[in-house]
Amino acid sequence: QVQLVESGGGLVQAGGSLRLSCAASGNIFSINLMGWYRQAAGRGRELVARITSDGSTNYVDSVKDRFTIYRDNAKNTVDLQMNRLKPEDTAVYYCNVILKLARWGTQRNYWGQGTQVTVSS
């Protein structure tokens, strides 16, 4: 019913930049939250950044002033611009969307397949 397609991961040197993109498609009525999480090897998944439908954002402290989250409500997309990348940013990054399939439906939680970001020192 709902698909999240991610793109933009890869290998970059420390100090470089990458931009991740995620597009949600399917029978979507409305999208509340869109965000990005990451999971480094041997660690739990953590919230990186998220954005509400009215544009309010929050970031994990370690990426503030380096990462920016963008959202296009018309296209159901969310991007994460990552600048001044550090080796500790290396992780699999997952797109996350909380949405409704119908006006009176419940909020549903969807995840993308994940995209690898590797930052070399």
Image (spheres, helix red, strand yellow):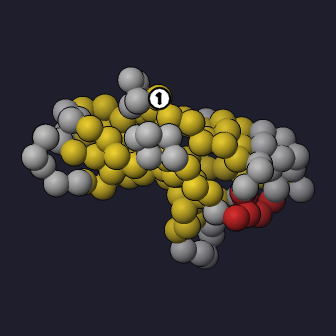
Residue 105 percent coordinates (x, y): 12, 49
Q: In the rendered image of this protein, does residue 6 appear above or below residue 39?
A: above
**118 left or right of 94?**
right
Which quadrant of the rendered structure holds the N terminus?
top left
Residue where numbered disc 1 is placed: 72
Q: Residue at x 87, y 50 (%)?
A: 14
Q: Residue at x 67, y 39 (%)?
A: 81
**31 left or right of 27?**
right
Q: Secondary structure at mark 1?
A: strand
Closest to the observer: 85 or 118?
Answer: 85
Specify few, some or many for label 1: CA neighbours under 10 Å numbering under 14, 14-19, or 20 or more. Answer: few
Q: Residue at x 73, y 55 (%)?
A: 64
Residue 11 percent coordinates (x, y): 74, 44
**84 left or right of 10?**
right
Can residue 18 be seen by looking at this rendering?
Answer: yes
User: Residue extending furthest top?
Assistant: 74
Residue 40 percent coordinates (x, y): 63, 66
Q: In the rendered image of this protein, does residue 42 appear above or below residue 108?
A: below
Residue 96 percent coordinates (x, y): 42, 51
Q: How many marks?
A: 1
What amino acid is at disc 1?
Asp
